[in-house]
Each structure stands twice: as structure tokens, then as C-alpha cells.
Image: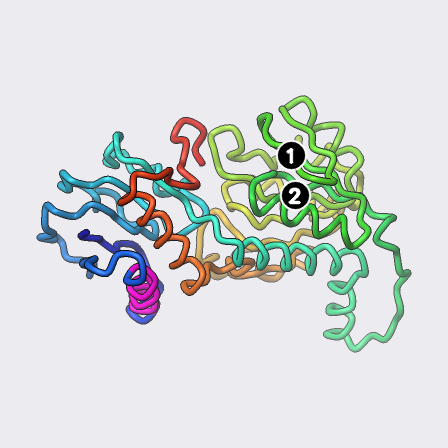
Amino acid sequence: MDILLTGRWADDEERDTWLAALQGAVQAVLPGARWWLDRGEAQPAWPADIEVAVVANPPPGRLQGLPRLRLIQSLWAGVDRLLADATLPAEVPIARMVDPTMNAAMAETVLWAVLTLLRGFHHYAAQQRAGLWRQLPQRRADELAVTVLGCGQMGATAARRLAAMGYRVRAWRATTGAPVDGIEVHAGAEALWPLLAGSDIVVNLLPLTPATRALIDARFLAALPPGAALVNLARGAHVVEADLLAALDTGRLGHAVLDVFATEPLPAGHPFWAHPGVTLLPHAAALTDPRSAATVVAANLRALVEGAEIVHRVDRRRGY
């Protein structure tokens, strides 16, 4: 089998780390696999025999001219950028990355963010910078209502972890779907607004689709109780940044923990960098681990060869 690795990487070292991990994992199940590496050539001369493209948000058009392509396997959990490429072959299935290791990492970041907001650790950080020694009131986890937006692998894992820590957790999804053990799940646009009205913290782990783009806008933020907090670990395009800044500036929103942004890297001088109401991460809430993700890729390639079901196949109509 001929396999193409293509994408956008931080540097050649990151790309080569992925290639080594993928080659090692796939070798165990497909010993004869041959790898082709996209080094950014303007007009690459890849063989027509390529059957699988393993991708990390490649530039649009990189998967054209592959007549035997049978599978596009994404290395990232989100596929919104990939699906935005109008040149993707419509008949080729796409699989997204669902890695239990990454799900656990995201849940850990959610627990950290919610605990930070519960116990006011962001306030203590500001007090440290100001040289101020002052204890703040300490709330209990069961006094906090947390709403998790998104009930996929990451959202469900995070919701269960929060519930296990004693928080009052509810979840919301845009459409109906499978239940989440131990979690009260609501679905549909009309169900969202009553949930927001009773939420001390909203954690966004939704996929980015036309229905969820710009969901977190002025109306959304106004539906929250005064002083509530937002944790956005999904996509920057979920948030209307001007509306979020306005809610923070007026005190309507108490604090925001942000890992993703409309433009990344976040431009120098952006108000989020120095805003006292923002805790900022550089899109690092849950990095894909090449070691575990490579085994997920290898399992799907084996399924392809054996005629078995490709797991985590993307529904292009839904956008994830």
C-alpha cells in the first residue's frame, strides 16, 4: 500500500516525528507499506498508486490527482478546515482522529479550568503579580453548575470527569444523539437557552459546523447569569470575539479561559493578551500525541485492507 503524509506542521521536526511514529505503527499491521512525504513542492509528482492520505490540515488542493485514493485519515480531531477544501474528492471517505489519550488530556484541561474558576486561582495569580496577600471565599464543587457544550468523545469524557468531582453537570448537543452515562443531556436550539440561564460555567467542546459557527455571541452571553464564566477549548470561530470582549468589559461575564481564537497564532496587540478577564492558552488544551494517534491510524488502515468498517468516519453533511 502507498501512503501519503501531507499537512501543515510547525516545523520539519514535528513532521518527521509524526512520520516516524506512523511508520512504526503501520509497519506492524502492513509490513509492505510505502510512505510518500509531502515536503511542500509546488507541483508534487506523487505516484498514482497512493491509496491513503494521512493528513494534518494540508493546504487546499493537495489531494488532487490521486485516482486510487481510498481513504483520507485526519491526524486532528477537528475536520472543519479539511472539509473547507472544495477540491477534496467527494467519493473518498474521511476519518477523523478520535484518540482516548487526547480525550483524557482534554478532560484534564477542563478540570483544571473549572477548578481555577471555582477556587478563584486566576484571582490569586493577579494578586501575586500585585503583591497582595488575601484569601478569597472558597466554594464547593457541588455549588457550581457546569454546562458542557458537545457530547462527542471529548465532551462526554469531560462531563463524566466533572461529575465525578462533584460538580452539577449538564450537557448540550445541537442535535439528538447517544446518551452519556450519568449526565443529563439536552438537545436542540430551544433547549440551549434555559441551560445557559442556570449555568455558572459553560465549557465549549462543540464541533465547528455552520450551525455552531458564531454561536457564542452577544445573545448567548446575555443569557448567562451575571458573573458566569466561559471555557472555550473547541474552535475560535465559535466565538464572536467583539461580543465576548464587550461582555468582559462590562462585567457581564466574569472570566473566560480561551485556548482557540479566530486568528492563530493570536496576533500581537490583540486585547485578549492583556485582558484581566482572560486566561489564555496557545491552542494547547489537548495536543495530539503521535504515539497513540499512530495506533489509531494503523487500525483504520488495517480495516481498509481487510474490508472492515472504517471507524470515526466523517459525515460531510454534518461537518464532523
Among all residues in the image, which is located at the extreme bottom? 131
Among all residues in the image, which is located at the extreme top? 190
Q: Nearer the viewer, residue 132 or 317?
A: 317
Q: Nearer the viewer, mark 2 or mark 1?
A: 1
Where residue 265 sits, quadrant-wise, is: bottom left
Which residue is under mark 2? Answer: 246
Residue type, label 2: Ala
Residue at x-position 44% and y-position 54%: 264
Q: Nearer the viewer, residue 17 or 101?
A: 101
Q: Which mark is residue 313?
A: none
Residue type, label 1: Ala
Q: Nearer the viewer, residue 118 or 286?
A: 286
For label 2, the crowd category at 10 Å Cα-Cα, with few meaning under 14, some 14 to 19 and many 20 or more, is: some
Q: Is residue 23 magenta?
A: yes
Q: Measured from the top left, where is residue 23 in percent x and y? A: 28, 63
Mark 2 vs 1: CB contact within 8 A: yes
For label 1, the crowd category at 10 Å Cα-Cα, with few meaning under 14, some 14 to 19 and many 20 or more, is: some
Which quadrant is home to the C terminus?
Answer: top left
Q: Is residue 24 magenta?
A: yes
Residue 315 seen anywhere in this rendered image of the structure: yes
Which range of residues does the magenta coloring cover? Answer: 14-26
- Where disc 2 sits, the SS reads helix
The overriding secondary structure of the stretch rendered in magenta is helix
Q: Measured from the top left, where is residue 307 in percent x and y? A: 30, 38
Which residue is under mark 1? Answer: 218
Where residue 188 sits, quadrant-wise, is: top right
User: Image check: 151 left or right of 266?
Assistant: right
Residue at x-position 52% and y-position 61%: 284
> Marks 2 and 1, how far apart in space?
8 Å
Relative height, residue 92 to residue 249 (above, below): above
Q: Measured from the top left, where is residue 125 in percent x and y? A: 73, 69
